[in-house]
Amino acid sequence: MRGVVIDAEWAPRSDYALSERERRDRRAVDASQVWRNPQWAVDERPDPRILEPDQVIVRSRAVGICGSDVHMFERDTDGYVLLGYRARFPIAFGHEFSGEVVEVGPAVCALSVGDAVAVEALNYCGTCRACRLGFFNECERAEDNGFTLDGGSAEFVLTRERYCWSLNHLRERFDEDALYEVGALMEPTSVAYNGMFIKGGGFRPGRHIAIFGCGPVGLLCAQLARAAGAGKIIAFDPQEARRAQARRCGADEAYDPIELERAGSSAAEAVMSATRGIGVAMAIEASGAGQVTLPQIERCLDYGGKAILIGLTLGPSPVRTGNYIVRAASLCGSLGHLGGGIGDAIELHASGRMDATSVISARYPLQEGVEAVKHTAQRTDAKVLIKH
Amino acid sequence: MRGVVIDAEWAPRSDYALSERERRDRRAVDASQVWRNPQWAVDERPDPRILEPDQVIVRSRAVGICGSDVHMFERDTDGYVLLGYRARFPIAFGHEFSGEVVEVGPAVCALSVGDAVAVEALNYCGTCRACRLGFFNECERAEDNGFTLDGGSAEFVLTRERYCWSLNHLRERFDEDALYEVGALMEPTSVAYNGMFIKGGGFRPGRHIAIFGCGPVGLLCAQLARAAGAGKIIAFDPQEARRAQARRCGADEAYDPIELERAGSSAAEAVMSATRGIGVAMAIEASGAGQVTLPQIERCLDYGGKAILIGLTLGPSPVRTGNYIVRAASLCGSLGHLGGGIGDAIELHASGRMDATSVISARYPLQEGVEAVKHTAQRTDAKVLIKH
Amino acid sequence: MRGVVIDAEWAPRSDYALSERERRDRRAVDASQVWRNPQWAVDERPDPRILEPDQVIVRSRAVGICGSDVHMFERDTDGYVLLGYRARFPIAFGHEFSGEVVEVGPAVCALSVGDAVAVEALNYCGTCRACRLGFFNECERAEDNGFTLDGGSAEFVLTRERYCWSLNHLRERFDEDALYEVGALMEPTSVAYNGMFIKGGGFRPGRHIAIFGCGPVGLLCAQLARAAGAGKIIAFDPQEARRAQARRCGADEAYDPIELERAGSSAAEAVMSATRGIGVAMAIEASGAGQVTLPQIERCLDYGGKAILIGLTLGPSPVRTGNYIVRAASLCGSLGHLGGGIGDAIELHASGRMDATSVISARYPLQEGVEAVKHTAQRTDAKVLIKH
Amino acid sequence: MRGVVIDAEWAPRSDYALSERERRDRRAVDASQVWRNPQWAVDERPDPRILEPDQVIVRSRAVGICGSDVHMFERDTDGYVLLGYRARFPIAFGHEFSGEVVEVGPAVCALSVGDAVAVEALNYCGTCRACRLGFFNECERAEDNGFTLDGGSAEFVLTRERYCWSLNHLRERFDEDALYEVGALMEPTSVAYNGMFIKGGGFRPGRHIAIFGCGPVGLLCAQLARAAGAGKIIAFDPQEARRAQARRCGADEAYDPIELERAGSSAAEAVMSATRGIGVAMAIEASGAGQVTLPQIERCLDYGGKAILIGLTLGPSPVRTGNYIVRAASLCGSLGHLGGGIGDAIELHASGRMDATSVISARYPLQEGVEAVKHTAQRTDAKVLIKH
């Protein structure tokens, strides 16, 4: 089968301590320490086969490109990929995808050939302590389509019944084409949903929300905030195009934080002003630049307010804990898309409360998959899709 | 000042044990055991005066009529009012009201003459154990405008700063007239909000909701469910007019439960069908007929689903606890409008997410106040307002 | 291998609609409708074999006898077993057990031969919607050791890594014999834990607790309440021996509810008196007689109090919902032992905060297994164990 | 009346912008910017008088000395007090106290002359937005006994019914002397309780707890953790005397974090080792040195673990947010003693689950009150009391 395939050289950095398993399986726990000179191409990968009774093969129909995919395309000055996550090459990239079920193992109960499904790419084990406690995203033995297993840029993907969520009932509202686009967006939508409503515990309708960073996840946070009855929604991003997109996704106000500083104000002040001094019940860190956003966030939280960490910031961020103490505020980390939020995100579409496809800014066919990634790497777009 | 004044005879039933305080203050803890032959009239009441430093006088602008008001209008075969709640007569009725601040005591900080406010009628003490624990609605020493203190059908109402919530910022979206209508609806909206989001803990966006009983509170539940991102919203009421109103308020489907039974189906089955077998995360009992609704509710709850008790059912209801056990479901009681939900409900209006005035079905001037109550007693309307 | 084996006649009642799967697999969804004339004997069962890579074989060391086991021993007037749960015969009974790992499949990571483990008998699928949402006890495709798979009264049990919880670190505090007794009690302890702390959400330390029904689960609730810092713990049971046991397990007061009624008082009044009028934050229904306990429970809940349903009551119970409304109280169903509580219960033992073995009232060797069940059927004991 | 009275010079720093209210009332919002050259003496203060109907006069019986009291004793190089909190001088210090009710206003319902009470020193208004939402500790208009009103080192204290919590029922377990000692400790106990169980949401019994900083609040956290069923309790403090005290208060292990570093290990590693790699469900920052403790805390949290901020750290602390993201962990600020935890802490004593008096390390009579503060300033003690 064809896919957008990444290959690279296995060249562990001299100061990186490879584990026995990494060496044996040629599977890096931190790709940026091991894989050099990545090459991307539309190429062949072996067709998947069902080996265990609960497995399913899905024909991929649409796959989104994420910042972490771009981190396998870009390289540092030594030629290493930027991705600080597990990876095994060669592999067909793509962890945000949907498709049609084309084959099911004998133990599969609730899926049939022909079903439209959104697929959870994080293959949690269900057995480790994290999984038993319901922390599936924190699974200690996980694999991922798109990083350690072939992903959604391939024509076919091997997965399991438990990672598939039916989209069949969306056919009442979406045509076949839009259906799979919605499906491909369920992964980033669930990342946002997980942070806001599962790990973050949600907010009372009417309370205000601030969003720092208007990449695809930030935009989906704005849509979800709007769908869930937020009062004022205030978004921040230095790029004008993204601020405009944030307004279309439901933000009442969108500011350039750099310009605010330049004008002697700040993001925190803009939030306090927009909320008449109340502050926000939830501030979402979706920029990965916590060093600059957290000092703003801690100054605009309402009593009991929550800062939700979704974007991954490297290195330490300065936190004045007194600001959390005097507001009874908290700061919550959130990782990944698992935990059932995907089912809720699908229902929001089934009931017509939300349409995530409005964050799509470009679509490419498979044969132009590498161009699609190059395009995404410019970081001016919202969400770029490859469609099979 | 003028108001819609209720008077009645103090005639404790022979089998009712009056407390010393009831005797001394002529204030019944259960009006239906004491007050007979109520007389309603537009009449004079003494003007209020500020006696304590945190008090406020509000000129009432709009007041809603509630089922419990009607229970002081209607009488049983012995002539007693039907209200099973505290009351002292004569009194100007009205616990759902808004108005303009016309005088403030010396300790009042955040209110000024001319401010538009929604007023919380339940005067909690702030000192009893319930209040200290934040259970203001359960205050052990409460008084109420409209039941034991003159209420919003009077031209002026004596209240305190802590019971007033500013509506000033709604002027951006509502004209002066609509502003006070929104304000008068904040009490029943907060009753719904308290049940759904504070006592009931809310629901994850995309999850389904069922509403049993489409009186004003049920209708406001539908509006709130819609604003807060519910998936499917399914409403039940035997009256066609109320079902139509429920659809306008955001219900996706509205059924007559009696007709469903007649057709061999049931409310529970209608919910399961509308939700493709999932059931609802929240079922709201807003009918006061728990004997017939709870047996349906317990059969259509999703895993972890919650039945929210808002309507007061007299006598026992049959509950098959096994239905709660196998679904990890729960049943939560909720009383009153206090707890801050009113602030959130106001913000929902300030941000344009909701418009509670759509439940108003009739408006009367003060001089026709008694007709307004008679009209409401027919129980065909949504919300009837008296406007000053 | 040997075990305490139940066999019975497959004789579906004439008015019971067998499903296709029940017929095909000779596995009743409701045993009491299908299985007649149960015979119990210490007998042979086929040795288990590992067929899937995550499976584990455990040599059983101790198994507790539960009321539901007795329901497969007792029969109604038509000779049918009383158990209203799934079952397939012949089978070695026993769902509360611990043992030693004697064989592991190739995918097992965190268990080794020789490990001491408590085993979760409810084999959840991990794939259905309930499981994906973390509602493992509510799994839609579950099997159970002791009901549809051979259980802990057999010498060996086939299970999976994910159902096993290590007891190795208890060796610091418990000798080999006590270790496996603790292990066998982890199932009922987790049932109590799940109801109180996971489904019920726990209680604030210092708040009061009432326990209705002092069978093994009720006694373990008393121990857990004590370990978790409850204020007053008040227990109710008509049997004097069980009340004495409750006091030893940490109850401050234990009453016979029938005697209280006879004396013109009630369980509710006893609670209100013991708590100086405050009531309880949590009342646990562990008797299965909700018809008589719920009317007491609803009258002695503190503000925000929770009634936890653990015991299964057949038929409807009368609930005066107004009692829940005026106290902002709730009623929560809880099923089963899964959800990670078993890990917490084990840690309570590892840290020396609790010793569940104090509820053991009799121990039998395997060859007297049938006598052990007969003894349990007298319902005068706390927990009876069979030890291998 | 006599008391331990602080006086100082009103000398606003040249770069501090006094507000109009500060100037008018001679009440600094930040004492360290305004008050210089504090003088402490056992001296006279005017007797309090009841002026409002819900007021109460309490004869103080015992008062604890807190670090913030010491911050009004110590001064910086310019002679300013160190306290970064509101204060008005002269004043009798003391915000941790208990006493006997000697006079009640006419509206007081539930208190009588002769009652033993613990008094909440933070006089919240009950009217501002924070109070209405139940965030009493965050009250926007608060005054405090001991900082802006005469406190518990005076013979008599003016307070209100709603700030008094009865200790009468402790007489069953504590003699008159111990009773008031327990009462004086209820303020710091509630600070710990509020952080752990109200703002922090508690922990599941059996889960592990780490405590950073073993001053009086840290020690009370250890006691509460033990009472509430924590698994392993691991404490850290550089002072050996405090570590020994922590062990007596329930810590299983207590380490010197400096020594751990010196030995090539760390506090985080000690926690992971003590918990067999699991980490803690709750890590309490009670040292006020977040710069050094937070980098440890974020590396030893269990899945879903919570870092509770109680100690006030000046300036920013470095937080690697990725550590919170990958563990679904959070960081919660907690301020103050209000919120009802004091009632729960009293019940823990009434039921015999805890005895906070074990943290008392020295007792002084009133006439030696200044020596008591000097003693506390050495920071080697647990809790020092002045007894009337």
Image: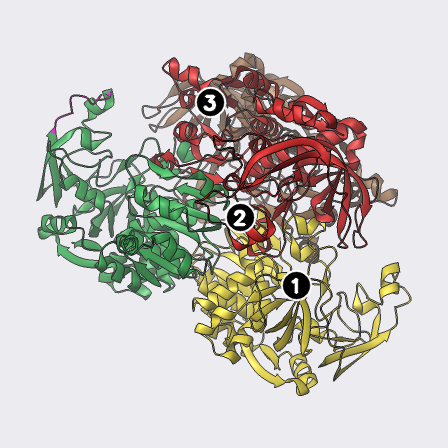
Chain colours: A green, B yellow, C brown, D red
Residues packed near mark 2 inside 10 Å, few (<14), some (14 to 19) or many (20 plus): many
Label number found at residue B327? 2
Residues packed near mark 3 inside 10 Å, few (<14), some (14 to 19) or many (20 plus): many
Residue D242, quarter of the rendered image: top right
Q: Is residue A318 shown left or right of residue C173? A: left
B128 above or below A90? below
Q: Amino acid at mark 3?
A: Thr
Q: Along the line of sight, which residue is nearer the eye, A191 or D291? A: D291
Magenta span contains residue D277:
no
- Looking at the rendering, the stretch of residues picked out in magenta corresponds to A10-19
* In contact (CB < 8 Å): disc 1 and disc 3: no
Residue D169, quarter of the rendered image: top right
Q: Which residue is mark 1?
A: B106
D287 above or below B34? above
Q: Along the line of sight, which residue is nearer the eye, C28 or A91? A: A91
Residues packed near mark 1 inside 10 Å, few (<14), some (14 to 19) or many (20 plus): few
Q: Which quarter of the rendered picture does the C terminus of chain B lie within?
A: bottom right
Q: Which residue is mark 3?
A: D275
Label number found at residue A170? none
The subunit carrying tag 3 is D
Confirm whether circles 2 and 3 share one chain: no
Q: Position of residue B175 (x, y in %)?
A: 48, 79
Asked whether the viewer can see residue C291, the reply is no
Residue at the (73%, 69%) spot, across then down: B147
Label 1 – label 2 distance at C-alpha: 55 Å
Select label 1 or label 3 by which is in front. Answer: 1
